[in-house]
Amino acid sequence: MKKNPIKNLVFRESFFNFKKYIGVLGYRTTKKEVYFPEYVKEFLVFVEKKGVEVLAHITSREIQQYHIYIHQRPNKYTGNPLSDKTIQQHMYALGLYFDFLLNIEAIQELPFVFPKFVHAPHQPREVLSMDEVLELYGACNSLIDKAVLTLAYGCGLRRNEIYSLNLNDIYIRQSMVVVRNGKRGKTRSIPLTESGKNDLKNYIHHERQIWVEAITQYNNPALLISKQGQRLSGDEINSRVKAIVARCKSRYINSRHITLHRLRHSIATHMIENGAGIEFVRDFLGHAGIDTTNIYVIKRKQRTALQKQLL
């Protein structure tokens, strides 16, 4: 589809925002079995050629015509007709896209009843509850474990940001963590809660200090280190989270794929749900633009609507 770019500026902007939206939801957006954004892009190019210029003017007619079109067009690699599974994926992607348009109020109602694709390759990322977060903290058996949770959940740091932290990036007296190597090289300061400050302080002044004193030649500035004084790798940090999860008594927590990024996703959602301003959350997470942060607001509205339906 690179040879057929989206020309309509509104369509193009909605496409790029949709890519961010499904990324936050937890769907893959690159080179796997399904590439949902490419399917949406193909649809938008299709409706452009039909003369539609406004998102709200897309009707069931255009969607039905597109459905016929993808049944007829050949696979660009094999020349064979698209498989039923691929066609299902196309329509499922459109369903996600129109749900997104509805949430941002670009449209007022869904123009089509989209089928649910039961074999979606990647389920949306779930948010941990506060009780589950507390259970994770309770399952820590070392000070470094609590420090990892504080950085991943309490500070909402990305995996590489945690890996890159040095000791001089932690300002205990000021209750602050400074991220100097954030995404796109940006620097930001993140406030620490009292409990988060204590978790980092205890690790630095006790466990980490003991390990350092046991090493005769030590010059590693890293915050998170092994007992041998080596900077913990991203995989080692993630392995610590897995070990914490494995020690939890809850079988439900044990069965879930809890990662560093899911902890970041959870604190963002919890902050929005507790009334934090969207600009504050944007700066806290280090998002480049507010549109990415706004996706958490959309998800909160979805959950609120669902809860009202269940009452």
Image (tube, grey):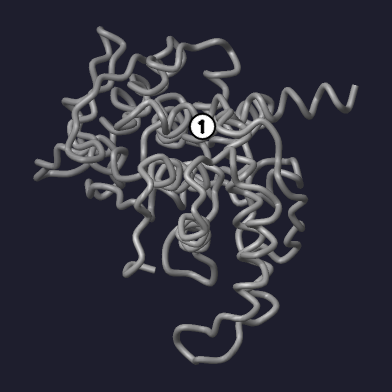
In the rendered image, which quarter is residue 198 located in?
A: top left
Quadrant location of the N terminus? bottom left
Along the line of sight, which residue is nearer the eye, 113 or 265? 113
Q: Residues within 10 Å of mark 1 (few under 14, many from 20)?
A: many
Pointer 1: what residue? 295
Q: Position of residue 161 (x, y in %)?
A: 29, 39
Total number of numbered discs in the rendering: 1
Residue positioned most to the front: 51
* Vertical relation: 93 (above or below) 159: below
Residue 94 as seen in the image, left or right of residue 228:
right
Residue 87 as seen in the image, left or right of residue 195:
right
Give the residue drawn at x 76%, y 58%: 115
Along the line of sight, which residue is nearer the eye, 236 or 22? 22
What kind of element bears circle 1? Answer: helix
In the rendered image, which quarter is residue 116 located in?
A: bottom right
* Vertical relation: 103 (above or below) 16: above
Give the residue drawn at x 20%, y 40%: 184
Q: Position of residue 90 (x, y in %)?
A: 61, 65
* Vertical relation: 149 (above or below) 46: above
Along the line of sight, which residue is nearer the eye, 251 or 278? 278
Residue 14 as seen in the image, left or right of residue 61:
left
Q: Position of residue 126 (x, y in %)?
A: 63, 41
Quadrant location of the C terminus? top right
Q: Position of residue 121 (x, y in %)?
A: 62, 64
Give the residue drawn at x 44%, y 49%: 238
**Given the image, on which type of amino acid does mark 1 rest?**
Ile
